[in-house]
Amino acid sequence: MTDRICAASGCMKTIHARGLCGPHYNRWKRSRDVQAEPLLNLSGDIEERFWARVDKTDSGCWLWVSSSRAGNYGDFHFAGVRYRAHVWAYERFVGPVPKGLQLDHLCHTNDSSCAGGVECLHRRCVNPAHLEPVTARENILRGNSIHAANAAKTHCVKGHPFDAANTHVKSRGNRVCRTCQRASMARYRARKKASTDMGDPS
């Protein structure tokens, strides 16, 4: 029996599902428009698959137009391996991300109007020129989040400095003022002593 041909205009590939070939069917599943560009590229070449999912914008950002993972960062699969799109692009065109560092989107850092978060379009940018390896703390400080605002503070709410001698950093990375911590413990001990004294029959 002769293989049936994809119903999309100009396509000569064989049918995968719903009268469409694999690439057109995948496009239809996402947008219900089988003629939308760019069509998914399902070839055996990782660079072709990457570029088929990139839209080079006038702003200089290379926006990822395919699937994303938690946090709205682009991702794709190739040969059974899952890649973060912006990390793959950086390592392909620049080099390995140094150990212990993460990639900061400079296009976001330079856009003061962007509130950040999972709706931030800059997270979908895969242009290596817009990416810079930085420490996790530096990445947070450059953002517009509550975490960034807290990390940028030089003093606690009581006015004590967040310096090396007066700062305790917890396992999650949040800072605690040692002066306030000592005062809190002193108040706790005083309350406990007063409670014990009240219960002492002598």
Image: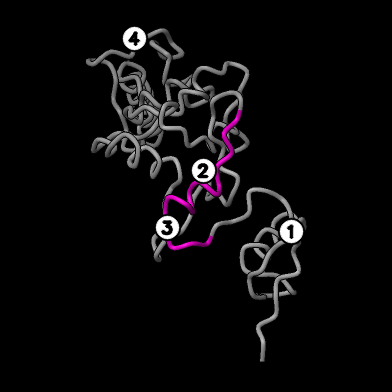
Can you say which quadrant of the picture contains the N terminus?
bottom right
Of labels 2 and 1, the one closer to you: 1
> Against 127, is 107 above or below?
above
Q: Which mark is residue 34?
A: 1
- Can residue 194 be seen by looking at this rendering? no
Q: Are marks 2 and 1 in contact (CB under 8 Å)?
A: no
Question: Label 3 crowding class (10 Å Cα cut-off): few <14, some 14-19, many 20+?
Answer: few
Residue picked out by circle 4: 161
Residue picked out by circle 2: 73
Q: Amino acid at mark 3?
A: Asp
Residue 52 percent coordinates (x, y): 55, 49
Task: Give the residue drawn at x 59%, y 56%.
Answer: 40
Q: Amino acid at mark 1?
A: Val
Residue picked out by circle 3: 45
Alpha carbon distance from label 2 to label 1: 25 Å
Mark earlier in primary sequence (3, 1): 1
Task: Give the residue drawn at x 59%, y 38%.
Answer: 55
Q: Which element type, helix, strand or loop, lies under badge 1? A: loop
Q: Is residue 163 left or right of residue 21?
A: left
Residue toward you, 115 or 173? 115
